[in-house]
Image (cartoon, rainbow, N blue to C red):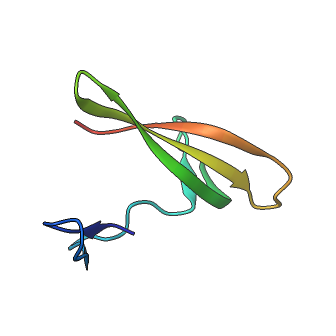
Amino acid sequence: MLFKSTNGLDWKLAEKPLVYTLELIWEDGLIQKMKAIERPQLYIEDGKPKTLLVAVSDTTGSYSFNVQIPLKQ
């Protein structure tokens, strides 16, 4: 969920609060549902966010891995 604040104390739900879903869309177009997508971090290059890094877990919870999601500029 995405919230906004002008002072860092008073927070309100953003106009478009959904940041991502539990589905990953791979380069070949395959859509894979995950059990969890968490620990979001931004990779920043030259002062601009380039990639969203997340940890994911499959629907069975059998395995987990990290995913790099390129951001649109």
The quarter of the picture where residue 26 lies is top right
Q: In the image, 58: left or right of 67?
A: right
Question: Does residue 26 sit above or below 10 in this rendering?
Answer: above
Question: Does residue 32 sit above or below 14 in this rendering?
Answer: above
Which quarter of the image is occupied by the C terminus?
Answer: top left
Q: Position of residue 72 (x, y in %)?
A: 28, 39
Residue farthest to the right, as pictured:
62
Q: In the image, 42: left or right of 30?
A: left
Q: Position of residue 31 (x, y in %)?
A: 58, 52
Which quarter of the image is occupied by the N terminus?
Answer: bottom left
Q: Position of residue 12 (x, y in %)?
A: 24, 78
Q: In the image, 34: left or right of 38?
A: right
* Residue 64 vs residue 6, the one in the foreground: 6
* Residue 45 vs residue 22, the one in the foreground: 45
Q: Position of residue 5 (x, y in %)?
A: 19, 68
Which residue is rendered at x = 58% and y = 55% of the image? 38
